[in-house]
Image (cartoon, grey):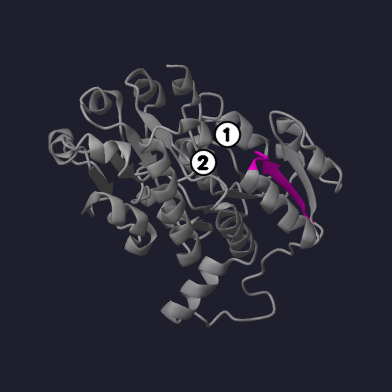
Amino acid sequence: MNEIQKNKLNKIVVFGNILPEGLKKLYENYEVVNYLENTIESEEEFLKKVSDAVAIITWFTHKINKSIIEKLNNVRVIANYAVGYDNIDIKAATSAGIVVLNTPDILTNATAEIAVLLTFACAKRAKEAILSVLTGNLDDVSPSFMLGKDIIGKTVGVIGAGRIGKRYAIMMQALGCNVIYYNRSKKEELEKIDIKYAELEDLLKTSDIVSLHLPLNEQSKNLLDMHKLSMMKDDAILVNTARAAIIDEKALINLLEKGKFFSVGLDVYNNEPYPDPKLLEFPNVIILPHIGSATYETRLKMAEFLSETLIIALNGRLTELKNLVNKEILGQ
């Protein structure tokens, strides 16, 4: 019997349609209640649902702000079913003594693959080609119809060389691209395989393809504003599978209206899951509904990992956790 059960606080509340087979260990050891809503429509209703819970599992669409955290009387752990955690006020959680967990490493391959998918879809004008078939608009098929871009030989600029950024960089190099990267510090493992560091402005000016792989924080928010977006080549491809707020979306739309960019591929955007209607009007903008980790294998591993580490956290073995977001809590 674990520590929480001894205290008769045995309830875990899960938000979102997370694979139940991945939560098997939780179902075996705790009372698990699952609510399928993917957003918090009412703070009051949310707090009622978690009032007697010792832990909650959230997704990136659940905004757990300071106001909510201050009212979580029994919750000891917030486990976020994502690698990012900007939906949670980490400072407030730490002050309240609440442990925050995430799912690093597991979704590296799946997200890098989505970035590659968007890169190719943008270069080959996949959205326009599919729409032409679906609408029967094929009268203009000719040797010059729907001309895209080659990928091999192009310069790919990777902004952010964490797990996903490194994987994407290596994949694009294997496909015959000249890959450069920008990061807070140089990555020796990339330098050794001739993927070279570049300053951000140089990367933006010289890259044919730019792919974003940064976490969202004060430094990265609106990193690509009007000024920096304007530095990019007029016929560049821009891909974002990281976080929407890294790009100033209004500036992006403004530049698209002026004809800048060959194509833009987004797996993240403001006001998810519903994109700005203006973005949908551009034939050269490809939008996916934030499916970077959406493979069965990856989502199952995420659920299993979160279940295992949540149990460890509830038993007070915080030093064993590799996915402890707010490490400052160890000193409390």
Q: Magenta span has 100?
A: no
In the image, which disc is placed on residue 252?
Answer: 2
Name the residue nearer the viewer: 45 or 30: 30
Q: Look at discs 1 and 2 and give the one toward the viewer.
A: 1
Q: Residue tagged by mark 1?
A: 224
Res. 95 in view:
yes
Classify mark 2: residues with Cα within 10 Å, few (<14), some (14-19) or many (20+).
many
Position of 176 relative to 4 (above/below)? below
Q: Is residue 92 left or right of residue 321?
A: left
For marks 1 and 2, give the CA distance.
9 Å
Task: State the extent of the magenta-drawn residues as a range.
Answer: 154-162
At a point 47% along the width and 17% down the height, the residue shown is 331
Q: Is residue 284 left or right of residue 149?
A: left
Position of 141 relative to 318 (above/below)? below
Res. 290 in view:
no
Name the residue nearer the viewer: 265 or 235: 265
In the image, which disc is placed on residue 194?
Answer: none
- What percent of the width, then of the height, locates residue 147? 66, 69
Tag 1 near tag 2, CB within 8 Å: yes
The amino acid type found where label 2 is placed reads Leu
- What percent of the width, then of the height, locates residue 167? 68, 52
Name the residue nearer the viewer: 81 or 202: 81
Position of 68 relative to 36 (above/below)? above
Name the residue nearer the viewer: 8 or 151: 8
Tell me the element at label 2: helix
At a point 27% along the width and 26% down the height, the residue shown is 69
